[in-house]
């Protein structure tokens, strides 16, 4: 039986003390991007910082990297290796010093995604969040090569891919099955399940969130809370709730038609008003 997510519960959990420097607030590396979707990594990276992460890096294919530094001057930009090549020393250092790594936003090719996940998995990382195209390859990827601390952010279509069947009427049971199967905390449309059997259910937010890039903001929000030091379950709950409430605030103020990047300042406001 899932526990409903309430504002009182979140206040009791609290948010880790940010400390006095950017290093104490956690470092995120977002891995993704493609020529067709170069902006997805920017949305995720900014969302992570908007909820409190102190530093962020972006790792993208060479064809995508020009201009990203100017688009987000707060971020370090790294180049992903091509094919089966290993990551270079600069990216390996960033990955291994990161408090959370997010992989998936903006990828659109299974082979490139698999190569990136394999290259990242070969680095010594502790906490990994998978999203978007990365979830399509996960059923055929060696789970043992990934960190124990794994968080999956899935929409309903991606959840069906992970289950290798359509979702049934009992969403909670399906998300719990994914969590057990992959040994990961799973967030899907407000439902969060952990491999040890805990489950929470939050209101997923209004229809205004059904806009391009909203999922990238969500994955970055969750990853930002991971980087702050929350355990994966609480980070998923906090991230899903914050993203949903940010969308609700915008929809009440301007109606349906806001852009994913409009959520950014609302994320910060929601966290500090909680």
Image: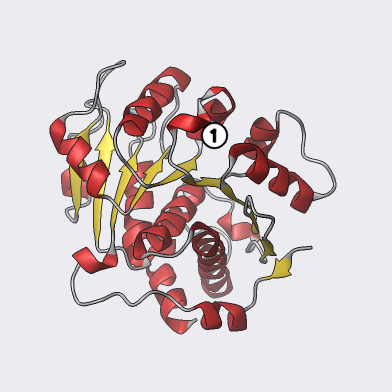
Q: Which residue is mark 1?
A: 135
How many marks are shown on the rendered structure? 1
Q: Where residue 124 sits: x, y (%)? A: 30, 39
| Vertical side of 180 occupied by 228: above or below | below
**What's the coloring here?**
secondary structure
* Relative horizontal placement of residue 54, taking residue 161 as reference (left or right): left
Out of 249 and 78, give the one closest to the viewer.
78
Asked if one can make out residue 98 in the rendered structure from this viewpoint, the answer is: yes
Q: Where residue 16 sits: x, y (%)? A: 38, 74
* Relative horizontal placement of residue 93, taking residue 33 as reference (left or right): left
| Vertical side of 94 occupied by 88: above or below | above
> At x 54% / y 30%, what residue is drawn?
138
Dot 1 crowding, Cα within 10 Å, few <14, some 14–19, many 20+? many
SS state under label 1:
helix
Give the quadrant of residue 145. Answer: top left
| Vertical side of 184 occupied by 239: above or below | below
User: Which image quadrant: the N terminus?
Assistant: bottom right
* Relative horizontal placement of residue 241, taking residue 110 as reference (left or right): right
In the image, farthest residue toward the right: 169
* Relative horizontal placement of residue 229, taking residue 204 as reference (left or right): left
Q: Where residue 164 sits: x, y (%)? A: 71, 28
Q: Where residue 104 sits: x, y (%)? A: 43, 37
> At x 27% / y 67%, what residue is drawn?
25
> At x 59% / y 27%, what residue is drawn?
139
Asked if one can make out residue 67 in the rendered structure from this viewpoint, the answer is: no
């Amino acid at each position: 039986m899932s526990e409903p997510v309430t504002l009182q519960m979140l206040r009791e959990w609290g948010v880790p003390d940010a400390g006095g420097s950017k290093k104490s607030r956690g470092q995120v590396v977002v891995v993704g991007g493609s020529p067709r979707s170069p902006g997805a990594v920017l949305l995720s990276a900014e969302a992570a910082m908007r909820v409190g992460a102190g530093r962020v890096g972006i790792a993208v294919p060479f064809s995508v990297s020009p201009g990203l530094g100017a688009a987000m001057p707060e971020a370090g930009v790294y180049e992903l290796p091509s094919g089966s090549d290993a990551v270079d020393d600069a990216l390996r250092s960033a990955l291994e010093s990161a408090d959370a790594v997010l992989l998936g936003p903006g990828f659109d090719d299974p082979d490139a995604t698999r190569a990136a996940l394999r290259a990242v998995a070969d680095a010594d990382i502790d906490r990994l969040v998978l999203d978007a195209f990365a979830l399509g390859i996960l059923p055929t990827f060696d789970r043992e090569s990934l960190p124990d601390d794994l968080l999956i952010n899935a929409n309903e279509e991606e959840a069906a891919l992970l289950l290798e069947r359509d979702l049934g009427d009992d969403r909670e049971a399906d998300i719990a099955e994914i969590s057990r199967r992959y040994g990961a905390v799973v967030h899907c449309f407000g439902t969060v399940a952990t491999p040890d059997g805990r489950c929470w259910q939050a209101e997923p937010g209004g229809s205004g969130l059904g806009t391009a890039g909203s999922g990238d903001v969500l994955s970055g929000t969750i990853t930002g809370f991971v980087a702050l030091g929350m355990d994966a379950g609480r980070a998923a709950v906090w991230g899903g709730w914050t993203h949903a409430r940010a969308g609700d605030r915008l929809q009440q103020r301007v109606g349906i038609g806001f852009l994913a990047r409009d959520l950014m300042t609302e994320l910060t406001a929601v966290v500090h008003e909680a």
